[in-house]
Amino acid sequence: MKHFLTILLTFVIIAAAMVITCPDKAKHLDTFDEMIDYYINQDETGMAALFSVFGGKRLIHNFFDPLLHVNNYFVVSIGEIQLAENESKTVSVGLLGHVFTIDKEQAVQILKEENIL
């Protein structure tokens, strides 16, 4: 019985930690901003200079905020970008306070296909 209570208590502590540290939309949006920032810095057409003049990350953040939807499943959160045809693609997964994203090149490809970038 003591062994069972120890396992149960461990499970409850881990589940509570996962719920408490589940990333919110702001954390997902910051990670998504980093993906876009990566694209802008890799672009050789001068977009980086143009974006820095017009507000840089704040402009990107405000533009993509309505496109990013985060589903919170208590222990994990899934970030999806809403596409033009009422379709969504997963771009990030949040777990234990961290947000893991798809490959940056893959994210940029999705945005280019949808004529967002």
Image (cartoon, grey):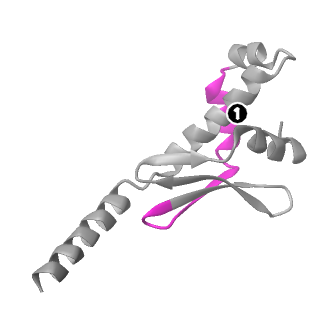
Looking at the rendered image, the quarter that the C terminus falls into is top right
Kindly identify the residue that appears in the image at 46 percent across and 46 percent down.
98
Pinpoint residue 59: horizontal percent, then vertical percent: 67, 29
Q: Quadrant of residue 58?
A: top right
Q: Quadrant of residue 33?
A: top right
Label count reads 1
Instruction: Tell me the kind of residue under disc 1.
Output: Ile
Q: Quadrant of residue 62?
A: top right
Pinpoint residue 93: horizontal percent, then vertical percent: 56, 54
Q: Is residue 38 left or right of residue 98?
A: right
Pinpoint residue 89: horizontal percent, then vertical percent: 74, 57
Q: Is residue 61 visible?
A: no
Pinpoint residue 66: horizontal percent, then vertical percent: 67, 49
Q: Is residue 68 magenta?
A: yes
Q: Is residue 33 left or right of residue 89?
A: left
Q: Is residue 47 magenta?
A: no
Say above or below: 13 vs 110.
below
**Helix, strand or loop status at disc 1:** helix
Say above or below: 114 vs 87.
above
The part of the chain drawn in magenta is 55-76
Kindly identify the residue that appears in the image at 80 percent across and 19 percent down.
47
Please tell me which residue lies in front, 34 or 62: 34
Q: Say which residue label 1 marks.
A: 36
Kindly identify the residue that appears in the image at 42 percent across and 56 percent down.
22
Q: Is residue 59 visible?
A: yes
- In the image as oriented, which residue stretches furthest toward the left? 2
Q: Is residue 25 left or right of residue 34?
A: left
Please tell me which residue lies in front, 21 or 57: 21
